Image: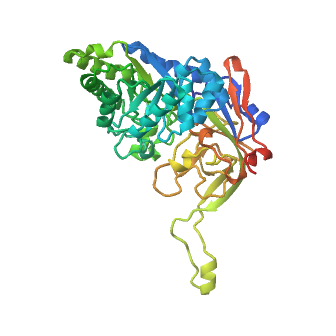
Amino acid sequence: MLQGWDIENFLEVKNNRLHVSGVDAVELSEQHGTPLFVYSEPRIRHNIERLKKSAEVIDCPLKLCYAAKAMSTMGILRAIKDARCDIEVNSGGELWKALKVGFTGDQIIFNGTSKEDWELRMAVENEIYAIQVDSLYELSLIEQTAEWVGKKANVSLRLVPEIETGTHSGLQTALLTSKFGMMPDEAFAAFRDLKDSPNLNLCGIHLHIGSQNPEPHAYAEAFKMLFASMRRIYEESGVTLQHINLGGGFPVNYLRDATQKKEFPDEQREMFAADFEPSEAIREAWSKVKNSAEQSGHAHLLENLTLLVEPGRSIVADAGICLTTVRNAKQRPVDNGQRIIDNGQSEDEKLSTFHYPLSTDNWLLTDAGFNILLSMETYKWYYHLISAERASDKHDTEYKLAGPLCDGGDVYFDHEGQNRLPEHRLLPADVQPGEVLALLNCGAYSLAQASQYNGRFLPPVVLVKEGGETELVRRREKFEDLIGSDL
């Protein structure tokens, strides 16, 4: 019987066990231990091809740039490059990794709000496709750097479009209150004043409306703003842009399995269950821009134009799972506010002993905590949980799930009582220590944000390839790694 989370030829059940692109997940956990991240290269390729369909619905070239911040383990970056996808980086470190894995300068774009001199030098020296400029001050630094290096810097100015979407507040990046980008008037002035700079090639404009956007119409608003900016730049400076950058933010359906869907507040449920084809959103948005361009007599601005998009989550989120082992189990009485105190007790006895109602919570403590799944705490993010060993059994028993860290927030539910996540997770009956569980859809912004908090080793990563071949692309850390940078 198919499960709600099943994805044909990717996440499937065989002999009651979870298989990832044909490979037994429990066998992988026995071979490499847990926690363990498992990524599917075929699924990564599928997601990239899905996004490339957008090229079929526009009248210009599409440049697809994977957002390395989502996951930048070298083996995953290599898989991205081998799938003929370009890359977006957000630091000099990510730029260095992209170059080391084999991306060329014309395949790289560089975002970020606080770029340092050495980062800008690396970008200019390697003649990357575009540095996304966050402010006029940064633009002046780039101009100085380019003069010093002796190469012209390709730059794209990041605008603040003031477009709000229904995503998490921490993922909003297109509002005046966010830290990103420059005001449009500042950008227009820069095009007027610096169009003839010998050190700068002002070749594009950029915006990003945030991540996990549930509304496809937001991209139409973004396109509308980009085209209006293109027109004004052309009219005021005579510059015809070489590219426009729509950013990323295409959603992943974290609630494919809807068994606990009703336990989410409406707004959270809409965000986690967001599911639309990026190519359809871009088709509608492009159509409106094209009509506007033709009616206004500015269709020539779309000629020789390249459209950039920079998705991360929608390429790797559902391609990765985290295997974790139950290490501890216990029961805890449910405190429903109705503590029963024996009036015959002394005052000291009343303070030290309470009689609770008979209901209890079953607690499971795993070896995967927010040190490797940070969004579970910072954003109260939801990753669907199943038993990898009993994947086709009924998941109808409630458990409280928590990780191994010495922090009360290291739990798989909303411990702050804000009702943003289910209070319990559903698993088969009688889960005991030693059983291997799987957190799904956690390939993005998990290991990329991981830390050694509590002196815990960062986990290994296995990449499953076509035909079921597996490759260990990151080893588990050792004791020496915990002090590798200490003096």
Question: Does residue 117 appear in the picture of this structure?
Answer: yes
| Nearer the observer, 65 or 221 | 65
Q: On the image, which quarter does residue 60 sit in?
A: top left
- In this rendering, the answer to whether 54 lies above or below 328 is above
Q: On the image, which quarter does residue 155 sit in?
A: top left
The x, y position of residue 381, in whole percent, is 52, 44
Question: Does residue 69 appear in the picture of this structure?
Answer: no
Left or right: 4 as drawn, with respect to 301 = right
The x, y position of residue 252, in whole percent, is 49, 32
| Nearer the observer, 401 or 372 | 372
The x, y position of residue 409, in whole percent, is 58, 55
For image coordinates 60% across by 64% down, the residue present is 358
| Nearer the observer, 426 or 315 | 315
What count of labels does the image hold?
0
Left or right: 61 as drawn, with respect to 301 = right
Q: Which quadrant: the N terminus?
A: top right
What's the colour scheme? rainbow
For image coordinates 65% across by 51% down, the residue present is 403
| Nearer the observer, 406 or 201 | 201
The x, y position of residue 329, in whole percent, is 70, 54
Q: On the image, which quarter does residue 286 sit in?
A: top left
Left or right: 202 as drawn, with respect to 352 = left
Left or right: 56 as drawn, with respect to 379 = left
